[in-house]
Image (cartoon, helix red, strand yellow):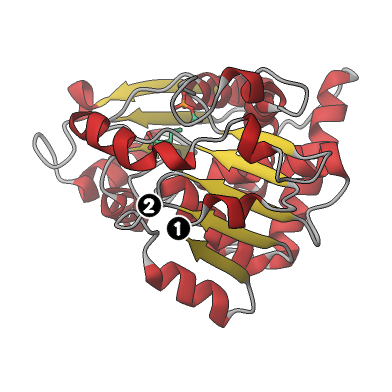
Amino acid sequence: MAAKDFLSLADFNRQELNALIDRAIAGKKEWKSGGGGTCMTRKAMGLIFHKPSLRTRVSFEVAARQLGGSAIYLTDKEIGIGSREPVGDVGEVLSRYLDIIMIRTFDHKIAEDLAAHATVPVINGLTDLLHPCQVVADLQTIVEHREAIEGKVVAFFGDGNNMALSWINAAATLPFELRIAVPPGFEPDENFVKAALGRGGKVLVTHDAREAATGADVLYTDVWASMGQEDEKVERARQMAPYQVNGELAGLARPDYLFLHCLPAHRGEEVTADVIDGPHAAVFDEAENRLHAQKAIMEMLLD
Ligand code: CP
Ligand code: NVA
């Protein structure tokens, strides 16, 4: 039984995650051949943003429309969660108008509190802790390009951030090996790693980028300073430089490696242009798949 909300991949079992990936792939084909789902007919979606976005905003707005409904973009100027109005009241009120809500915010607890008070499904469109929609799109991209995730080695480089933690949640549930290479002091929360290992997941955290890259099927990186960490940009760049995904590091991966990045990317920082603009990169398919993955998530929650 799927959860009411989509806040963390940890709330979903292997069968549910596989069903989401399969539905995202099938829904993409249906849409491109003139068909597609209608689960948003007579329904409205709210999109709450406390941080900037290109992909998440546009893909959710388009998803709501392609599924037959509408979407409303809301920033904190309108709502003032926690200042103008308590988050619980916001959840109660929005549930009287909307059929589904997405929130992108800083503190993960705000998304959890909103979901606890909302009677309609709430989707995490990125918090400081997790970015689960992105990983569903990433998994879809790997399956589309390399047939399966089973048995693959995914290597993540740079910061043990919201993307790294979402990947750890995926590795707790799905049968692939995850290696995370980060500088000392930037390791992902060890409770996530312990939980994944406890569920039989294969997760390695290392300070050695070469160890992570060797023989990997997928190389993945993300910005070194996430939204809200802009003041730390210079110091982070100094510490994370050895974890840059460049031609030399990629040379250690499998010859048919796939390069993924959630975007936005900073060429010359976490990845070099020859890799992200090279023949192994699938970053724009990955960005496109946000739309199809999120349509599958919305269908699952509204079912
Ligand atoms: N990858 C991603 O979530 O992009 P945006 O921040 O542009 O939404
Ligand atoms: N870690 C990044 C992901 C952006 C999609 C951030 O939180 O800014």
The amino acid at mark 1 is: His
Question: For mark 1, what is the residue?
Answer: 207
Element under label 2? Answer: loop
Question: For mark 2, what is the residue?
Answer: 183
Residue located farthest toward the bottom when viewing the structure as drawn: 198
Crowding around mark 1 (Cα neighbors within 10 Å: few <14, some 14 to 19, many 20+) is some
Q: Residue at x 59, y 18 (%)?
A: 273
Does mark 1's beta carbon lie closer than 8 Å to ligand 2? Answer: no
Q: Quadrant of the N terminus?
A: bottom right
Give how far across and how far down residue 264 sits, in percent. 48, 23
Q: Nearer the viewer, residue 1 or 260?
A: 260
Q: Residue at x 32, y 23 (%)?
A: 74
Residue located farthest toward the left when viewing the structure as drawn: 83
Q: Find ligand 2 in the image and state its quadrant.
A: top left
Q: Is residue 241 above or below residue 196?
A: above
Residue located farthest toward the front when viewing the structure as drawn: 248
Residue 285 falls in image quadrant:
top right
Query: Are the residues at dot 1 and dot 2 in contact (C-beta closer than 8 Å)?
Result: yes
Q: Is residue 23 above or below residue 295?
A: below
- Dot 1 or dot 2, earlier in sequence: 2
Crowding around mark 2 (Cα neighbors within 10 Å: few <14, some 14 to 19, many 20+) is many
Residue 121 seen by the camera: no
Q: Is residue 190 above or below residue 29?
A: below
Give how far across and how far down residue 268 sits, in percent. 47, 21
Q: Is residue 290 above or below residue 134?
A: above
Q: Is residue 174 left or right of residue 22?
A: left
Q: Nearer the viewer, residue 134 or 146?
A: 146
Q: Is residue 52 left or right of residue 203?
A: left
Element under label 1? Answer: loop
The amino acid at mark 2 is: Pro
Q: Residue at x 76, y 29 (%)?
A: 280
Residue 241 seen by the camera: yes
